[in-house]
Image (cartoon, grey):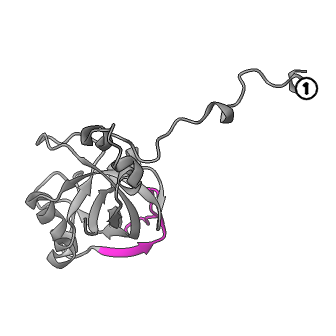
Amino acid sequence: MRRVRIWLENWEWECCGEPFSLGSEVVWGLIPMGDELRSWLATPLGADAVTAITHYETHHADGDDVEPTPTRGRVDSIDAVYWKLAPHRGGDPRVLYPIASTGALESREHADGWEPETDGGPSFGGYIVELAPLRQAWRRFGRLRQSPRMSSDCRARVMPYSFQPSERRRRPAVPPRQQRR
């Protein structure tokens, strides 16, 4: 699978996102970008910047009953997205929308959903992240993939990096005699 550029919405990442950095391996629920979201983002960012975005990440069910596809990958770039906000003319002054052509990208090495803002300055809108998808762990190990006792359906359900520690490595439930005092 080729690299993907992903839109991470600020409110969703502040709510439920885990911090990540350049080079981090992540598993995100991705949905292909739809025309409505692409058009909405093109207002502040411009069509050229939005054309390269292929997916958006979500932790929540979509109203269109589109299930996110869990995708494991390595973070190759992080851009914090800022834009200016204002109410629509004649609309509710408490509801703010991005102003056309005010979007700006700032490169980051680390992201946690909380970006600095200044009063009267641009507001943080989200992140654009480039992700290099990684093959699932079960595909990397030829022995597991070629096992005649495992069906392809069973292999597909093996979670990356999941294993049971051996009995020898488990910590005893009762501490050694010296530590009980």
Quadrant position of residue 80: bottom left
Q: Secondary structure at mark 1?
A: helix
Residue at 39% from the left image edge and 75% from the top image edge: 106
Q: Height in image: 80 above or below 72? A: below
The magenta stretch is 104-120
Q: Is residue 167 magenta?
A: no
Location of the N terminus by quadrant is: bottom left
Residue situated in front as seen by the camera: 126 or 166: 166
Residue at 88% from the left image edge and 22% from the top image edge: 177
What is the three-letter code of the residue carrying label 1?
A: Gln
Location of the C terminus by quadrant is: top right
- Give how far across and how far down residue 174 sits, in percent: 76, 20
- Give how far across and how far down residue 60 sits, in percent: 27, 41
Quadrant position of residue 47: bottom left
Residue situated in front as seen by the camera: 86 or 81: 81
Q: Which residue is mark 1?
A: 178
Q: Height in image: 167 above or below 125? A: above
Residue situated in front as seen by the camera: 9 or 56: 56
